[in-house]
Image (cartoon, helix red, strand yellow):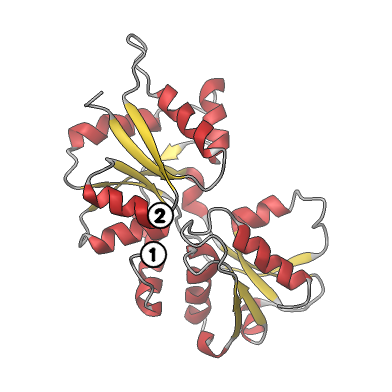
């Protein structure tokens, strides 16, 4: 179908296939059965953003760093379309061994810090930004980086688990991880009582459906409206929403990305990651 919206996403886990097949089914015409969209999965976000800019896909399901990268490489010509409700309340949690007495930015400043992948906004870039904002001289800190799954922007969570393992093994004092990872660990029988929160950053935004300004609004507008119409109370819709980790899709909260743009500039982060 030549008039289909083509959405690109990164295959960071096996469940990405059923998620996107479910979304495609949701966009089927009830009369013809034809889907008004299709999807393409990529191995990394650099390739996805390149494809978005080149026009190989109409819309990209980007991380916050990928969204920022698209904006920076096109002089602001990328268009934010929609995100998950959970994307608007992301934060970084600094965790230490229980009883460590490490507390707040000052306590973290004097500790050995474990960070996740260098291309993870929540596990590497923003942790340093928020510490610096609190007056910590991050260049003087003892930092160990776990660059696991570079290209996935921390979506697999592997680098965060590596950072946690370093804390538990006594090789680091504090690990910076996303609040989603921390919340998930709270339900893990292996973790109770072994770790505690030393500090948590202010909230910021995570993923964003992104298009280029060359895509007419009459093309992406109906797609966005139908996406926003997914209903948690509908069992078929809920299956997709649960897999993707949200209760509803929302319109862009652009103010939640300013901290990342600032961090990229401060740290000289390569916008082509």
Q: Secondary structure at mark 2?
A: helix
Q: Where in the figure is residue 61, as x and y percent of width and height? A: 39, 45
Q: Where in the figure is residue 146, as x and y percent of width and height? A: 60, 70
Q: Secondary structure at mark 1?
A: loop
Q: Is residue 246 visible?
A: no
Q: Residue at x 19, y 37 (%)?
A: 217
Residue 45 — which label?
2
Q: Is residue 222 visible?
A: yes
Q: Is residue 183 left or right of residue 57?
A: right
Residue beneath disc 1: 273
Q: Where in the figure is residue 13, as x and y percent of width and height? A: 56, 45
Please state, as top left, top right, bottom left or bottom right, where the C terminus lies in the image: bottom left
Q: Residue at x 74, y 66 (%)?
A: 196
Q: Is residue 128 above or below residue 80?
A: below
Q: Is residue 40 left or right of residue 161?
A: left
Hey, which residue is sitting farthest top in the picture?
31
Q: Residue at x 38, y 31 (%)?
A: 227
- The answer to which of marks 2 and 1 sits earlier in the sequence is 2
Q: Where in the figure is residue 34, as x and y percent of width and height? A: 34, 17
Instruction: Specify few, some or many for label 1: CA neighbours under 10 Å numbering under 14, 14-19, or 20 or more.
Output: some
Q: Is residue 32 left or right of residue 125?
A: left
Q: Is residue 270 above or below residue 33?
A: below
Mark 2 touching mark 1, by CB under 8 A? yes
Please state, as top left, top right, bottom left or bottom right, where the N terminus lies in the image: top left
**Alpha carbon of mark 2 to alpha carbon of mark 1: how far?**
8 Å
Instruction: Specify few, some or many for label 2: CA neighbours under 10 Å numbering under 14, 14-19, or 20 or more.
Output: many
Q: Residue at x 43, y 38 (%)?
A: 249
Q: Is residue 219 above or below residue 99?
A: above
């Amino acid at each position: 179908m030549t008039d289909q919206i083509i959405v690109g996403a990164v295959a960071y886990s096996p469940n990405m296939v059923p998620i996107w097949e479910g979304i495609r089914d949701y966009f089927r015409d009830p009369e013809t059965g034809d889907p008004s969209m299709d999807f393409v999965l990529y191995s990394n976000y650099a390739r996805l953003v390149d494809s978005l800019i080149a026009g190989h896909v109409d819309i990209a399901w980007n991380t916050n760093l990928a969204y920022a990268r698209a904006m920076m490489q096109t002089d602001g010509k990328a268009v934010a379309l929609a995100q998950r409700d959970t994307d608007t309340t992301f934060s970084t949690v600094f965790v230490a061994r229980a009883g460590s007495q490490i507390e707040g930015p000052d306590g973290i400043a004097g500790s050995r810090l474990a960070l996740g992948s260098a291309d993870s906004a929540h596990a590497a870039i923003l942790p340093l930004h928020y510490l610096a904002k609190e007056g910590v001289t991050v260049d003087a800190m003892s930092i160990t980086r776990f660059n696991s799954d570079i290209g996935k922007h921390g979506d697999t969570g592997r680098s965060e688990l590596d950072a946690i393992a370093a804390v538990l093994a006594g090789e680091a004092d504090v690990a910076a991880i996303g609040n989603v990872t921390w919340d998930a660990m709270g339900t893990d029988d292996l973790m109770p009582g072994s770790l505690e929160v030393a500090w948590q950053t202010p909230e910021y935004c995570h993923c964003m459906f992104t298009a280029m300004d060359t895509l007419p609004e009459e093309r992406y507008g109906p797609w966005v409206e139908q996406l926003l119409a997914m209903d948690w109370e509908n069992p078929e819709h809920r299956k997709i929403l649960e897999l993707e980790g949200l209760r509803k899709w929302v319109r862009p909260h652009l103010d939640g990305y300013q901290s990342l743009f600032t961090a990229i500039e401060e740290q000289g982060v390569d916008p082509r990651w």
